Image (tube, helix red, strand yellow):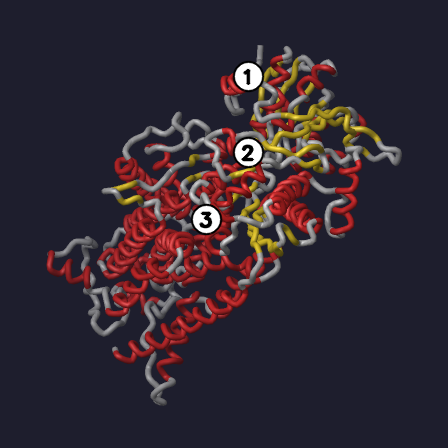
Amino acid sequence: MSKYGKVFARSLIGAAATFAVVAMVGQAQAQETLKIGLLASLEGPFAAPGQDGMRGADLALKQHNGMAGGKKIEFIKVSSDATPDKAVNSTRKAVEQDKVQIMIGPLSGDEGIAVKNYAKTQPNVTFINGSSGAQAATLTDPAPNFYRFNTEGAQWMVGLGEHALGKGYKKVYLIAEDYGFPYSQVQGFMASYCAKGGKVLDKAWVPLGTKDYASVIAKIPKDIDALVVVLGGSDAVNFLTQYEQAGGDKPMVGGSITVDQTVLNFKGKRRESLLGTASAGPMADSIDTAEWKKFVADYKANFKDGFPSPSLFAYLYYINTKAALDALDAVKGDLSGGQKAYRDALQKTNFKGPAGDVKIDGNRNGVGTTYITEVAKAADGSFYNKVVKSVPNISQTLGLPEAEFKKMGLGTRDVPDCRK
Amino acid sequence: MNSSQAAAAAARGNRGSATVQPLPVRPVPERQGDPPRWLAALFRPIGWRHAIVAACVLAYPFFATPFFTFQIGAQSLALGLIALSLTFLGGYGGMVSLAQMTVAGFAAYLLAIFGTSSNAAISLGWPWWLALVFALTLATVFAAAIGWLSVRTEGIYTIMITLAVGVAFFYLAQQNYTLFNGFQGFSKLAAPTVFGVDFGQPMAFYFLVLACAAAGYFFVKHLIHSPFGVALQGIRDNPRRMASLGFNVTAHRVGAYAVTGFLAAVGGVLMVWYNGRISPGTVGTGAMINILIIAVLGGMRHPIGAFIGAVVFVLLQNFAIDLVDRERFNLVIGGVFLAIVLFSPDGLLGLWQKLRARLSRLPSNKVTQPRPRPHSSTKSRSET
């Protein structure tokens, strides 16, 4: 028995020695720099967008020459797989283990709500959103140290309702994925569309990643003017293909991530029918301003392995990171006193971003510009999203007075409703 | 299958340590004996090594940061408890079930539905202890039902049918809004405050999980030596012979599913308190396979393997990103798993056995016989 004692003791000592060495190496690596945590989805369904989000943040830091407030900035990058559990675990690691004082992220909506709830337990750390766009993150029970400089899913669709009515779409049928982000998008569209007399005859909520739309297509009424399609990525392409095969011929109105490059490169017979498809979002590839062109040029110059043009996620991470770094400059890197001065500086943020002004409201949520686009044909025959209108200064209450917005409530499967 | 081993196999609950006497096989597989013997059996598996490990894990939160206490310590133990249920079912029952995470998730969902959560329209708002009792009971029944369904199959077919059950539950949870609240699930599921102790705090939560994990560990160790456990191992090795000896094979197997289902349910409740929320992603295919990875990583020969596997798994998940390029860290995780399984089919426990054999030979220059390994004949097991 004592022999096992020796063996056991020896192994314990070995383990302790290994642990001590690891701990010492960890100590030696600590330097006099300011650490900022950066969370994006580098695994799972949003891995490619997450990578592009990181590019956006890197670009903002590069334009600051890697410095802010007189200190060298080091990003502590952590990853999630787009689930809230993983996002909170990764954030907790960056905050409690790597001791970051400022945390940027996450990428998707439900992650944002979970990180906001975690932020409440860490009052001395400032949390800045990455690209998540759930309404509830800043509208319901907001955290005083969670800032979001971008606008969210519902704000991105404001103005599209009037635009659709202007095109003569009085009755529409809606197909959307069944989770938080499309709920917000649909509310942003319907809030003004219903108020101005439009009718959404019915809504088909399909699970994320649906392959077969036959049952949905069969239920589309004959007497509608257009379809509102709030699907993303492969879901949108699958629906479009099957709708075409079923002989559908109604025009389409898209959500912020519906009419992207994969849909524009759609090769079906009715490709031409995509022309004129309206959608809306916080940015568009073809914004005709000097700021946007400089942003695209910088992105292309810095990331040879990036997309042909910065994605939505690169743009959102970029403006959030830039706001975080600018505020650090404003307070000269002073994060003392529970970061009070720094948070005041964040609150006063107001700069001209690549796609319009960046500023926040009292709930620390972005107030910004939405771009209404339509699919158009370029000189070389390729399709692109042409900006037809920009709507500045959209608040989180979608331009409604706060009481009226509260009466409507946050977007869900059944809210808002205007069938008849 | 080597049938000459089968007779001995039934009595092989013995782990081979000097103090343990092989239990006689009793024809009636009931767990309770006369009280003194029962008590002795309860304390028998506790050795001095356990005392040292216990001291370490008890002192751990006083030295570690809250991050290490909560995210590494508590999460490892909770995951380890779910993996322990698979270790018992797979290692001692010969039934590898992928649905252990499903049972855990089922308990977590029930806790949210019966108790309080962010979704007041669905949650019934019962006091936490009542919700807990119902969640654990119904999850155990659910696990027994999965057992009924899958005991007719063996080997890879058991994996397939439990995978099917797990995936079906995942889609049900994702698409049902009246009961499971679909994609968004439930949030604000905090651990309760009992007698002024807020179990949501890292240290209190750690000790809660530690107590559950230790109870689960010793329960399984006890169960292995109990007539039920011995009979189960006999069934694992030769079900036909056990049936001819008068054992009800199906009942034992379903019983094993129910018992492990209870362990998994406790782990699931701890996980939901840890995360503070439950959504379909928690019971997805990836999470189901993670439990299998943890069990295999640690080694399925001994209950402690589940916890060792969980610690390594959680450490890798958290710190692999610091080792290499941010976009490639999953390669490290996969590489380590591959290396362990490749070089030691028995997981980390197998490595430990080899190391111990080497270490015990080195100091005194004389060749000593390594301790007989528990369940050293695996060839007759219905390996999957």
Residue B339: % across, % down: 52, 66
For residue A307, side relative to residue B42 (left or right): right
| CA distance for labels 1 and 2 | 29 Å
Q: Chain letter for mark 2, please.
A: A
- Between B129 and A394, the one lying in front of the other is A394
Question: Residue drawn 45% across and 51% down?
Answer: B159
Badge 3 crowding class, 10 Å Cα cut-off, few under 14, some 14 to 19, many 20 or more, is many
Residue type (three-letter) at the residue carrying disc 3: Met
The residue singled out by tag 3 in the image is B288
Residue A21: % across, % down: 47, 71
- Please tell me whether mark 3 or mark 1 is closer to you in this view: 1
Residue type (three-letter) at the residue carrying disc 2: Arg
- Local SS, label 2: loop
The residue singled out by tag 1 in the image is A417
In the image, residue A10 sits, relative to residue A125, either above or below, namely below
| CA distance for labels 2 and 3 | 38 Å
